[in-house]
Image (spheres, rainbow, N blue to C red):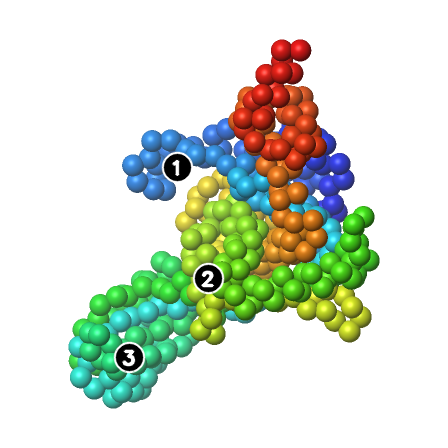
Amino acid sequence: MPFDSRLPNFRSFSPVQRLEHVQQLLGLSSEDATLLRDAGALPLEIADGMIENVIGKFELPYALASNFRVNGRDMLVPMVVEEPSVVAAASFMAKLTRPAGGFMTSSSAPLMRAQVQIVGVRDPHNARLSLLGNKDEIITLANSKDQLLNKLGGGCRDLEVHTFVDSPRGPMLVAHLIVDVRDAMGANTVNTMAEAVAPLMERLTGGKVRLRILSNLADLRLARAQLRIAPEHLDTPEFKGTDVIEGVIDAYTFAAIDPYRAATHNKGIMNGIDPLVVATGNDWRAVEAGAHAYACRSGHYGSLTTWEKDDQGHLVGTIEMPMPLGLVGGATKTHPLAQLSLRILGVNSAQELAEIAVAVGLAQNLGALRALATEGIQRGHMALHARNVALAAGARGDEVDWLVKEMVAAKDVRSDRAEALLHEKRGQ
């Protein structure tokens, strides 16, 4: 059911009021609301089955980013994160994209690579052709290990063979099974296929198979997002939108040419992506690994985004990067809150989820670049960080807002200052 992802005055509500509003807006059940409201959404019994040596559970704040419109559909984006300003920045940047239609996204097929390492090969070039000459047999054997995936339209699609003639351990072949994993992240599927074809590859090459495992550089499984913002929508009381655009492009160019800047630039992108990946129970370490490896694909570590100006003077941002997410398997299928996150998003495929993730990353990147190009990153961030400082100092209830206001006005956000102000107020 279509709805408006803008949440006016949402920040001024209490957490209970926010939940009630979202429950009505999205038509969430009372059981869904209970998962969000009460501690213990993940039963200890399920947690114990997910990983080893469980003694308890660990919670992080669960929030909703507002204003997102992706391919013409409004949505609220679940984000699980501890860092202040992330949700606010993503929501505000999404709001700025709405006049031009929001985010446009696309993606490639959900193809993952399984690598099979073959050592001890005396004739690596000839062995490579032996594998390629028997490609159909190898693919058929791989597909025999997952009939369900075949029925869903997926399966092993191709074989690549890479030759390393002069490795420190002698000639080596690395065969890649290219597998369409559909709505799974795909690690278990491709690992099983790699193990299944290993004996056949040994017979064909005369070598010894060592590693049989997926690659987290999912460079065939790409998600893309675009946005466009007119200069007037970037105006602030202190800065003209045209100047903001020039500052954003300069900041992006810095990241494109300098790896020291690019590391922080890309971390800001992942500030948006990781919270959504966590909220949906996906593997954020795999996403991070693939993202940073992809940023090096040209031999130079650079930006995952691009920022340009079109012929109308509008700011245009794009992102393209690996996004190996799933809707089935692992914690995505096990964790009750992960399932609820998918219902809130209303996604029907892993590709759609991947496209939303990169849209959030692009929004988050714009938030950071816009701040850096204008008042600096600390002004907005410290105002939100002040809430954590106030809470750590012992402020509760109305004391929190009062203490935040005092510290921000004085541009002095420190724990010792917060404690002194709180002590003084309570003494009065």
Crowding around mark 1 (Cα neighbors within 10 Å: few <14, some 14 to 19, many 20+) is few
Q: Is residue 113 left or right of residue 52?
A: right
Q: Is residue 178 left or right of residue 393?
A: left
Q: Amino acid at mark 2?
A: His
Which residue is at 37% across, 65% downward?
215
Which residue is label 1 attached to?
Answer: 46
Is residue 210 visible in the rendered image? The answer is yes
Foreground mark, 1 or 2, reads 2
Q: Where 299 falls versus 79 (above or below)?
A: below
> Sequence-wise, which precedes: disc 3 or disc 1?
1
Spatial CA distance of label 1 from label 2 is 32 Å
Spatial CA distance of label 2 from label 3 is 24 Å
Q: Is residue 379 left or right of residue 300?
A: right
Which residue is label 2 attached to?
Answer: 292
Is residue 111 visible in the rendered image? The answer is no
Crowding around mark 3 (Cα neighbors within 10 Å: few <14, some 14 to 19, many 20+) is some
